[in-house]
Amino acid sequence: MKTILVLFILCCAVVLPAVGELTVEDIEKIDAKIRASEDRIKEYINIKNESVDKRLSLVTTLIVGPIALIVLAVVIPQAILTLRESGNRERDRKIEELTKEIETLKQQIVNL
């Protein structure tokens, strides 16, 4: 038991104390590595953002394009029908006026 205790004390005495302080150069190296890592991360994120923006633009185009075609397919015929209807109303009004005139003329002829 004494030998183990002596060996243990001897081992503890032989171990050299470690220096745990960081030098200025060490801190600068760590800062440089952190900055380089941040730059790489920022570049990676920018590349990914560009890719997502392109995909989003493509998806938007693929959605808006057919919607625009559908709207045009509905609006153009509706506009044509509205124009025709207004023309028909005008024609019907003129026909009514002419019919009344004919009726008036017929009554005048009958009264003669």
Image (tube, rainbow, N blue to C red):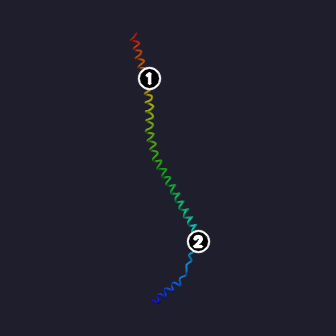
Residue assigned mark 1: 94
**Quadrant housing residue 97:** top left
Residue sitting at x 55%, y 63%: 38
Task: Tell me the element at label 2.
Answer: helix
| In this view, 33 is above or below 104 | below
Q: Locate residue 22 relative to residue 3 in the image: left or right.
A: right
Q: Amino acid at mark 1?
A: Lys
The residue lying toward the viewer, choosing from 83 and 35, is 35
**Numbered tag placed on residue 26 in the rendering:** 2
Can you give x and y, in whole percent of width and height, for residue 107 in the image? 39, 14
Q: Please give the name of the residue rendered at 43% of the width and 27% of the height, measured from the top-left corner.
A: 89
Hey, what amino acid is under mark 2? Asp
**In the rendered image, the vertical position of residue 59 relative to residue 14, given as above or below:** above
Q: Position of residue 54 (x, y in %)?
A: 50, 52
Looking at the rendering, in which quadrant would you find the N terminus? bottom left
Q: Which of the 4 image quarters holds residue 26?
A: bottom right
User: Going 49% across and 54% down the picture, which residue do you hit?
Assistant: 52
| Quadrant, the C terminus | top left
